[in-house]
Image: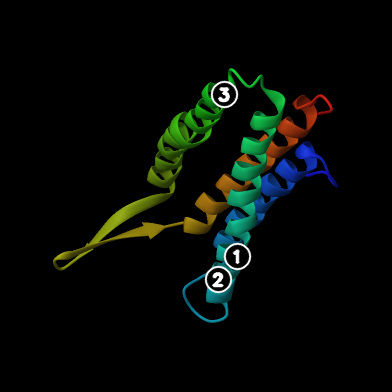
Amino acid sequence: MKRYGIKNVMLIAMFAWVLRFGLFGLGNPGFPGVLLFILSMIVYGVAFDFFNISGSLFVDQSTDPSLRSSAQGLFMLMTNGIGATVGTLAAQTVINNYTKPLTIGADTFTVGNWSACWYIFAAYALVIAVCFSIVFRPKKI
């Protein structure tokens, strides 16, 4: 973070999410598509850790010590609570629009255009990253 700054580190994380979702869209259970799924798991480490750890460090460094624990709690609530809930509900809407259940015998499978779902998620992550790059202007700490 000292070398690249908080904004760039968080943007790396956001673009890692775009890459991760894009890899899911390109991948498939067969070979060599499964390698893209494996690569997406590696990218997930960058996406998750860079965002959550750098965000927590930024909150820690930019808040008054008397408010620090409340600020950390608010950051976690917004990202892993409200953000995750809203994201889940939005993802459900996308998936419901691009897939359908298929019953064969006693088994039910979900079929449809999964690649489109992943590309929509990648596009959403890209829009958020671009908006973040425009709006987020941290003070030098």
Q: Nearer the viewer, residue 117 or 13?
A: 13
Q: CA distance from mark 3 to mark 2?
A: 35 Å
On the question of residue 118 being in view, the answer is yes
Q: CA distance from mark 2 to mark 1?
A: 7 Å
Which residue type does callout 1 highlight?
Ile
Taking 25 as reference, is 133 left or right?
A: right
Q: Earlier in the sequence, mark 3 or mark 2?
A: 2
Taking 107 as reference, is 80 left or right?
A: right
Residue of label 2: 38
Residue of label 1: 42
Taking 61 as reference, is 116 left or right?
A: left
Give the total of numbered labels. Answer: 3
Residue found at x 47% / y 57%: 114
Residue found at x 78% / y 44%: 1
* Mark 1 touches mark 3? (CB < 8 Å): no
Which quarter of the picture shows residue 26? bottom right
On the question of residue 17 being in view, the answer is no
Which residue type does callout 2 highlight?
Ile
Q: Earlier in the sequence, mark 1 or mark 3?
A: 1
